[in-house]
Amino acid sequence: MLNSIYVCLQQLVPLVQSSVLGEQALISIGYAAMAPLFNGSTLSPKWVDANSIVALQQVSERLLVSIFESHPVQRTWLLEEVLTSLIKMPSDQRTQRKYRVTGSRPIHTVSAMILRLIQSSASHQDQDARREEHGKGPGPPENNSDDQGQVPKDPELPIESVVHDARVVLDSVMSPASFIVRFLIARTIKREAKVSSLESEYRALLEALVDDTTSLLNLPEWPVAEIVLRTYTSQLVDLIEDPKIDVAIKGTAVDHLGLIATKLASVATSLSTPTDLCNDSDMGGDDASEGGQQQEEQFEDYSPMPKLHGEIPLAELQKLSCLVTQYLQHLRGSSSKDASERHALRLFAANMLMALAPALKSAYQEQSATAVLTNAKYNQDDGDGGDVEGDGSCETERQKIAHKLSQLLQDTLNEKWPNEDPSIVTVQDNILPWNRLMSISECLSTVLALHQSFDTIIGHIVYALGMSTVALRSRALKALGNVIVHDPSILGRVNVKFAINHRLQDSSPMVREAAIDLIGKHAVTRPDLIEQYYDYLCVRVLDRGAAVRKRVMRILREVYLRSKDMGRLVDISRRILLRTGDEERRVKEMATRILQELWLSNVPGVPRLSASGGSEFAQLKAFSSFPCSAQRELAKRVGVMANVAGHATAPQENHLVLMEAFFKQAWDNRAKPEAGIHAHMFPAIISAAFEQLLRAEEAQQPPGDRDTQILALMHLIDVLSAVWPEWVGQYIEMLTVYLKANVPQDEVSIVILILTILGRTIPHVPRQSPKFIREVETELIKMLSSSPQSVLAKAIPCLCAIVEGLSLSHAKLVRVLASCSGKYIFEDLGALLRCGTTQDNALTLVINTPHTCA
């Protein structure tokens, strides 16, 4: 029984193609062809061979395609019946990917059938019918050019008739494509408050079709994929702009626009990346004597074509002609007489002709103007004539290439196959390797309308970023992120940057975090992009959402590790340091971990020193003993810390307090395994800080810059002395050079910091030279008589600390203070107490000094 049905349907195929059947007969045959396709589950009892069912469905599909190809009038109702019947198929048959495609993953059988029906519209029968409507009669137009690719003698524009034929073929394909897209979209849109039981089925069918079509894009056998996606894209744009459309439908539209744009961006990126496709021997041609033809076959510039705006540069036109020639020669040489492959060739030629029509017309229109210009210039002197001859030959070359290209596409459009025309030689040497063929196909696809509309697609995704619904904005960010994975330069566009900046200020924390994540994933590795987005990121480190602040800190960490700009490193460190005082515990912990990694991570070449220090640490030469790479890294870290400590645009006390707390926490946690790895870096950092101080004092730079650098280092040493006074105390001899009787005004801040450091560190140094102690004591005594009040507030506690802890020269201190006026003593008493000195005897002495003076 099945064999009889199979034979019957097979015999109907040529009968349908003969165009002798009436409308009623075609309708009956159409229903007969659809029955095995959509009712296959009813033909599968145990006694029926599965292979027989598959063969019957294949011949049924072939018969349906024949009706669709040969009878354009029947297409609309056939498509409607097919799309309606698809939902009646068992779900497992609709969702299975059984149709194998060369160069792509398997696709759904349903999608393959729909695309084959659309592609079969590129038939001669439909073209002849359209020609008869316009009064031209069937058949291709005559070709007035010779076979050598020369410019035709007739100066009229023969390209007009070729473009007209291409438009006829393209319209024939776009009509069913548009019908299918509109049909499926209409079935997925909710009607009022009702939820259709078939809505989810049609939505799944539409998503499967879009996914399969996107995977088939640029495959030589499926040029219909570009037509379908182009049509679908225009419908998606209308959905996004329509205020009456449901939010879920708009979200799907945004997702699909992102899917299509991602595919286009990946193609452009792969073409822009140079790769070794294959050796010349892979081309199949061993004869290297065929000059120009061999050069065409070896043409390997597959970079994306520029946007076509009328005239195309000569070099790009030459490249285009070479690629089209190789592409069509391969397809003609490898194609059989199967109708689907012929449809693919005709559709490619029509699509390419429509895309290149403005450029080809421009080249043809230049012919008469060039001839007149050349003849006029030849009447001038020889020098000018030589120059013009070169220009004239360039224009003539453009016309030759344009005519050759249009002639080749016209022959393909009119199915002028090699076996029908001996002048077109197709041999196995023209068969290209698959990767080279795909590169050519992708390069040629960049001139087609879908690729040329890439900016428009991105623009509508950006438009969706400003919609009122949080879910839509989030999906638009996700879609844009998928595209940026392949083309990060999109982040540099003005409209994209403007939209992302607004999303960084979005009312939804989820959207803000998604925008931050988008920048972090793609802009960090591009210095040009991070320059544009850095200020936006820095503002978000104060975001009210804890998750956003954490994400920003992760991005800033990546920027820090990749940056060499000292100003940028200082700014990042300062912002992360401020987050160590965040009110959110997890944000504070993350900021501390990041800062420990940036400042206290291990430096190769720096030995692990004991927590109490060692004899090797007691000398400054410990820093010079490190490898050069370690010295550079330590100097960079100390420079960053110093500039953060001395930052002048924010309250310094906050920075200093947070930095001191950070160092103290890292040292207190040294016993923990995860924190102990940072503790051994402190001695090296202290040594590096004093080394940088020496270099700053000896540097040949303007005094203002030098003093700023020294002051910043003093701030850092001041913080370090609060945590490790016994270690910093081993270097205090380097600081006493600033102690002088008359302190210049520009050094007051430095001297105050030095006095604070001395007061902290000297009592903790067990063994100091008596001579050094006396010298420091003497300098401090001299400063009491001639220093500003701010210096005295630090000098007196420092002197008391030295007397109480080291020199024990109480009588000398009493005499010095007794010689001072009571005004200074009582004014400085409160300052002494605020300094927090713990020398009870010294404080008692100072308090009783006025009575002694009396």
Image: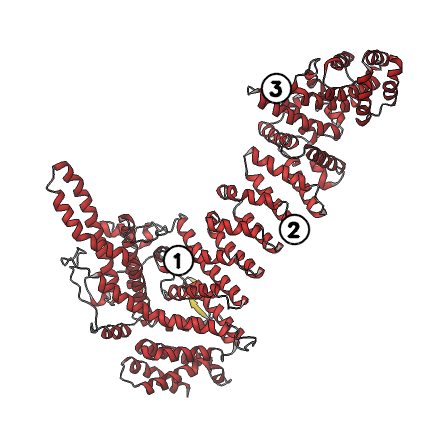
How busy is the neighbourhood of tag 3: few (under 14 within 10 Å), some, or many (20 plus)?
some
Task: State how the image is colored.
Answer: secondary structure
Which label sits on residue 697?
3
Mark 3 / mark 2, whichever is N-terminal? 2
Give the alpha-carbon distance from disc 3 to disc 1, as whole Å: 62 Å
Give the alpha-carbon distance from disc 1 to disc 2, as whole Å: 38 Å
Location of residue 708 (image quadrant): top right
Q: Do tag 3 and tag 2 residues touch (Cβ < 8 Å)?
A: no
> What residue is shown with label 2?
545
Observer-nearest of 672 and 245? 245
Q: In x, y percent, where is residue 783?
A: 74, 14
The amino acid type of the residue labelled 2 equals Gly
> What residue is shown with label 1?
453
Q: In x, y percent, where is residue 298?
A: 30, 50
Q: In x, y percent, where is residue 744?
A: 66, 16
Mark 1 / mark 2, whichever is N-terminal? 1
Which residue in the rendered view is the most extreme toward the front?
823
Q: In x, y percent, where is residue 441?
A: 35, 58
Which label sits on residue 826?
none
Query: Is 227 placed left or right of 423 in the picture?
Result: right
The answer to whether residue 290 is visible is: no
Q: Is 100 situated above or below 632?
A: below
Secondary structure beneath label 1: loop
The residue under the point 36% across, 58% down is 445
